[in-house]
Image (tube, helix red, strand yellow):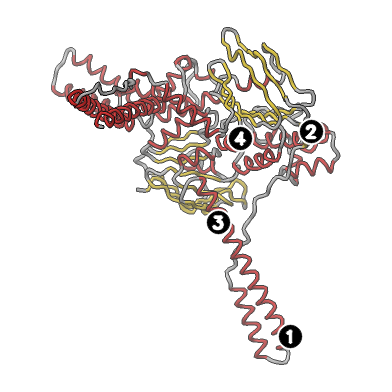
Amino acid sequence: MVDISVKNLTKFFVIGENLLEDLSFEIQEGECVAILGRNGCGKTTLFNILTGQMDYDSGEVFVNPNKKLGLISQIPRFPAGYTVEDVLRSAYAELFALKAKMERLEKEMAGDNSIELLRRYDDLSNRFQSGGGYDMDVEVDKVCNGLGITAAQRVQEFDSLSGGEKTRVNLARLLLEKTDILLLDEPTNHLDLRNVEWLEGYINSFKGTVLTISHDRFFLDRVADRVIEITDGHAEFYSGNYSFYIEEKQARFNLQLKQYEQEQAKLKQLGYTVERMKGWGINNRTLYRRAMSIQHRMERIKKTERPKTEKTMKATFGEKDFSGDMVFSVKNMEKSFGDRTLFSGVELKVEGGERIALLGDNGTGKSTFIRCLLGDEDCGGKIQFGPTVKWEYLPQIIKFSHPERSLYDTMLYEKNCTPQMARDRLGAFLFQGEDVFKSVGNLSGGEQSRLRLCMLMDEKINLLILDEPTNHLDIASREWVEAAIEEFEGVLLFVSHDRYFIEKFAERIWLLEDGGIRDFKCGYSKFRSILEHEAMQKVPEAAAPKVKKEKPKGGTKESEKLVRRLEREIEKQEQVIAELDKAIEAAAADYQELTRLLGEKENAEAVLFDLMEQWEAAQS
């Protein structure tokens, strides 16, 4: 069944310049489709058209009228004084209306037990139950746990939350509404790694249809069944996840380039032949007619367009030589806000050439740690930098002292460079033509990050500190930044929730949790496997008791008794594992419960293996 169908959709904002042009695609029920394309290609405009928030100029748009559609993009307004709990409960507006009717009928039934009232109450009760009315509290708790919405946050006023917190609450509300078709516009923005992993699990177990716009490549690999890329207003289709899309796109580029080159070679050869035959045909009409026939055939040949290559940034960091072993060290570092301790007793040492990711849940103090390290925030303990260390910092929130200045003037005044150098450096970061005269304050978040990075690139540094460097960047821009960082040979310390970026660069990981920093001297994949192993080890021993190995006491009778007892215990343990398998299947959308159950199963399987070993020993 088709849930969404778009045929020949055209939308323009400036006459003669179409943002979307003859765009056509279909989304089948239950698919999870990624919508990709450069910033400004019309992805969010498409979502606004699908939800009816924006009109279009021509074409047909169909959304299954029997399905409930929800969009996570802009945060809706709620009445003043609404708490987070009120916002979450608004997902059950229809059920609360049913409950109110039931309560009114209950009062009427106190003085009138007519069959008609009983029938109406029974009908309302069935609708309330089938709609999940009696499971509301459980569902709200489950989604809040998965998205890290704490009990303290649930009693806060919604308007007092940060933008990221509002996004999470709004996402939770949409999930509670039991939406059939989810439109997710950058759903992983403002979510930490734990929340993103929970969201991935939810989407993978979601029975409905999902369209997602995202620049999180790891996320797209985990959830997308196929990819639709919007290029020059048209749709290109790829029948796989992000990794498939990358390989297939390159294969198509290579094929198109090969066809183009073959056609150009053939046309060149035919053109040469035509010119020669025309020369020979001055006194020979037959040859001349044949030349003209070949020329007409050349004009009719359907020509393959030369495939477009993406513009790339040509920029590298100016590096300062580093001498010595230590870049910086931290001893007994601590930071508190009132009664709340972010971290304490931190002991770390960094040497030349290291690449370190600072990870942790939102609100644990990662950005604060960076500011303390650089002296922008007061803290306890001792911080010491090597004598030849020169650092630069790209913060999460970019600010310019003169936002009214153009990009060109910003480079001239702040970097003290010549007009030609300013042009060249901006051009290396794809700020070209009239773009260099835009005011800095009017740039998008991604463009501001790119400009600030452009200003850092020429600095002679050997320590680069980045706080969420890929936020607000589209995939192409992320790849440009990664290419520049890859060339940098100094020490890299970064905060990021972009797992693709972390996997690529982190050789050491600092995990900020429970008021301290744990130091993992390994990459991201090994770090994840260590955490998963630890989570399974934390399962209470009572859930999977350690069975002592028993040796036969000697004698055939004793051995036979031991074999029979072990067989009974093996059978019981197999039943325990079977029950856990059922529970794991039922908890597929609950990240925390799923983690706990998987840990129990691993312990139960270890017990079963232990029993099997004892049984084999007793048999022998």
Q: Secondary structure at mark 1?
A: helix
Q: Which residue is mark 3?
A: 251
Q: Earlier in the sequence, mark 2 or mark 3?
A: 3
Q: Please state which amino acid type lies under the numbered disc 4.
A: His
Q: Residues within 10 Å of mark 1 (few under 14, many from 20)?
A: some
Residue sitting at x 40%, y 44%: 31
Q: Residue at x 44, y 15 (%)?
A: 151
Can the viewer see residue 591 in this picture? yes
Q: Position of residue 294 (x, y in %)?
A: 62, 80
Q: Which residue is mark 2?
A: 320
Identify the residue under disc 1. 279
**Which quadrant holds the C terminus?**
top left
Single out the residue that lies furthest toward the right.
Answer: 418
Q: Is residue 93 in sight in this rendering?
A: no
Q: Is residue 435 left or right of residue 340?
A: right
Return the residue found at the far top.
339
**Residue at left 52%, top 40%?**
213
Extreme residue toward the bottom, this view: 283
Check whether the beta carbons of the residues at disc 4 and disc 2 lie within 8 A of each other: no
Question: Whole-Å distance between the Cαs marked 3 and 4?
Answer: 28 Å
Residue 13 in picture, x, y percent from top left: 60, 45
